[in-house]
Amino acid sequence: MNRNFKNLVIFLGPLVVFVSLFALIPVIGTFWISLFRDVSFLPEKKFVGISQYVKLFRDGQTLRSIWFTFIFALTSVFLEMLLGVMAALVINENFRGRNVLRGMILIPWAIPSVVGARIWQLIFRYDYGAANYVLRGVFGIHINWTATPLGALCVLVVADAWRTTSFVAIIILAGLQTVPEELYEQGRIDGADLFKRFFHITLPAIKPVVIVALLFRTIDALRVFDILYIITNGGPSGATTSLSLYSYQYFLMGDFGYGSAVSVILFLMAFLCSLFYLKAGRFREAVS
Amino acid sequence: MKTTFIAFFILVVFFFGCSREESQLTFSVGGAPNEVDYWETIIHEFEEAENVQVNFLRQPTDTDQRRQGLVIPLKAEEDDPDVFLMDVAWVGQFSTSGWLEPLDAFIRKDGFQIDAMFQPVIEQVDRSPNGIIALPVYLDCGILYYRKDLLEKYGFDIPETWNDLVKASEKIQGGERGNNPMFFGFVWQGAQYEGLMCNFLEYISSNGGSLGDLGKKDITIDRKENEEALTFMRDLIHTYKISPPNTFTEMKEEEVRHAFQSGNALFERNWPYAWKLHQSDASPVKDKVGIAILPAFAGCRSAAALGGWHIGISRFSDHKEEAWKLVSFIMSYDAQKKLALNLGWNPGRKDIYQDAEVINKKPEMDVLKSALAYAVARPNVPYYSLMSSILQRYIHAAISGEMAPGEALSGAQGDIQKTIDSYHE
C-alpha cells in the first residue's frame, strides 16, 4: 500500500503538477475572470455572475462565430481524415521510393502554420495568385476567392487540410503497422475484396488510432486562429471569425471579462467533443 | 532526502533564479526593421548623452501585435516597459485605463516646448482630463497619390471632388485597359482591419458626416451623410468598377502601394510613407507621381484620417525621471529632425517643417503640412477599439455587397450602443 502510494506519487505527481500548472489553473482562472466585468477602461472590476454568458447568447456575432467554428471543424476534420487515411494506406504499401514519399508527406506539417497560411493567401490572391493564374489561362476568368462567406470557408478548409493531413497520415500509418499481415491473408482466402478488407479488418484494427487522430484534429480545428488571422482576418464581415479570434479581439479592446467568457464557451465545445469521442469510440475498451 | 533537497533547489532556481538583479529603463518600440534599427541608433545617442542605460525591447511590425505586447504588461501593472510608442487609436483606451503617467509636471519643470507641437493633435489626442499623457512622435494622414503623366495625357486636373475622381478614373481606366488589363482607376484600403476605419472616416467626414458627439455619449452613426458616403464606397467597387474587386478582401496599405507602384492604378489613397518608395530608383512610376489632399464630396471639406505614433510613460514605471529624459530627448528638435531625414517621418513638431535642410531633402513636406490641416482624428474615447471592431464588420458587409449601406449603419449603431450600455448597467 505504502509502496503503491509512493509509486503513484512518483509517476503521476509530475503529471498532475504540470497539468494543473499549465492547463487546469488557467482554465479555472479564465472562468473566474469571465464572471467579472473586467474592462480596462472602466473604474472598477465588478462581479456580474453569469450575465456575460447571457449577453453572449444575445450577441449575433458570437452565435455566428460558434456556428462558423463548428462548421469549420466539421468540414476540415472530415476532409483531413479522409485524405489522411488514404495517404496512410498508400505509404503503408511496399513500393520503390516509399521512404522518400513518407518523408515528403511530412513537409507541410513541418512548415510553421503561419508560413503555410501565407502561402495559401498568396495562392488565392485575386490579382497575382496562382489559382487565378491557372483559371485565367484555362477558362479566362478570375475569382475573388475570399469575397463570400462560402468562398472564404473553402479557402480556409483547404489551407488547413493541406497542412494537417500529413499529421493524420503519420498517426494512422503508425496504427496500420500494428495490423498483422496474417489477417489480410485470411481475408483474401475468404474472398474478401479490397473494400471489405478495409472495412472489416483495417478499420476496426486502427480504430483507437483514428479516435486519437480525430480527437487531436477536432480540438485543434476548434481552436483555429492563425490561418484565418492571416488569410481573412475574420472577414468577409465577420463570417469567418472563429471563437478564438473573437475572444482575441475582445482582449485587444480591453474587455477581458467578455473575452474570457467567449474562451470558456470554446473550451466547453472542445471538452464536450472530446468526451463524445472517448465515449462513442469506447476508447477505454479499445486501448485495453 | 538528498533527492528531495535537489528537487527543491531546482524548483527554487527555476522560479526565483530568473529575477532581474538590477532594473533599468526599458523602451518598447516596433515597426519596420529599418525603423527599429534606427531607433537603436537614437537610443545609443541618448545613452551617451545622458549616461542612462536603456534596455531596448524590439517589438514586431504588426500594429495589433505591438499593442498586445503592451496590453499584457500594463494590465498586470508590471514596472517594465517604462516608455513605449502607441498608435494614435489606442491612446484613449490606454489613458482611460489609467496606464499612462501625466506629463505636465515634467513639462513644467523642464520648460519643455509643448507649443512646438501641432496643437490640434495635442488637443484631440494627447490631452486627457488628467493632463497631457502622451506626445506625438510622428504624424500620418491620408493623402491622394496620382499619376501625373496619365492625367496630363488625358487632359484631367487633380480631382477636387470625389465626382471628379470617378470621371477621370472611368475615362483613363477605359483608355489604359487596352495595354494593361489589370489597370484600375482608384485603389484604397478596404480589407476588414483598422485601415478600413480610417478610409471610412475620410469618406463620411468629407461629406459632412461624423460618428456623433462621442464625448457626450451621443453615438449617431446611422445618418444620411454617412449612408451616402458608404454607398459611394460600395459603388466605387460594384457600380463604377474603378476600384478592383479585391478591394474589400485584400487591400491593405502594402497591397494598395504595390498596385499603384507597379503602374496598375491612376489614383491611390495611402499614408505618406508610400512617397519615398514610389520615388525609389527601382519603382516603375518614379517621377510620374504627384500628391495632393484627398477629394471631398461637392460642397464639403476634405478630410484626412490622422494616424501616427505617440510616446508615453507607463504609470507603473520604476524609472519615471529617466523615462522623461528619454521622452524629451526623442521629442527634441535634433532627434525629430533626424527621424524626418532618415526615416522620412513627419514629425510631431511644427518647427521641423520650416527647417531648410529638411525642406531641401523632402519637398513633399509642404503638401503634408497642408494635408494635416484637414486631419480628422479617430474618436478619442476609451471604447474606440470596440466600436471600430464592430463598425469594421458592418462597413465590410456593406462594401462587399452583403448588406445595404443604411441597414449596415443602423446595425452597427445598435450593436455599439448595446455594448456600451452594458458597461454602464
Image (cartoon, rainbow, N blue to C red):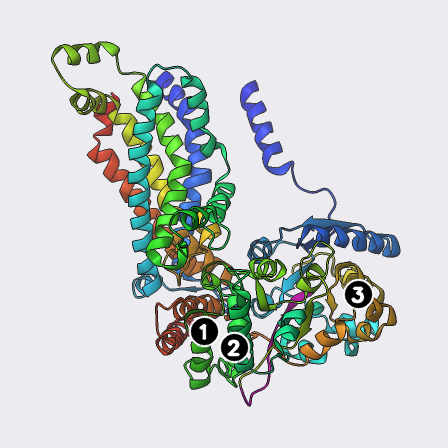
Residue A87 visible here: yes
Q: Tag 1, which chain?
A: B
In the rendered view, tell whether residue B410 sits above or below residue A267.
below
Q: Which mark is residue A16?
A: none
Left or right of B109 in this view: B377 = left
Spatial CA distance of label 1 from label 2 is 8 Å
Which amino acid does the dot numbered 2 rest on? Answer: Val
Point out the stretch of residues depicted in magenta.
B298-314
Within-10-Å neighbours for mark 2: few <14, some 14–19, many 20+: some
Element marked by disc 2: helix
x 30%, y 28%: residue: A86
Within-10-Å neighbours for mark 3: few <14, some 14–19, many 20+: many
Q: Earlier in the sequence, mark 1 or mark 3?
A: 1
Report which quarter residue B307 is drawn in. bottom right
- Residue B406 place in picture, x, y as percent: 37, 79
In the rendered view, tell whether residue A109 sits above or below residue B267.
above
Q: Earlier in the sequence, mark 3 or mark 2?
A: 2
Q: Where does label 2 land, which residue?
A: B166
Q: Where does label 1 land, which residue?
A: B240
Left or right of B31 in this view: A63 = left
Which amino acid does the dot numbered 1 rest on? Answer: Tyr
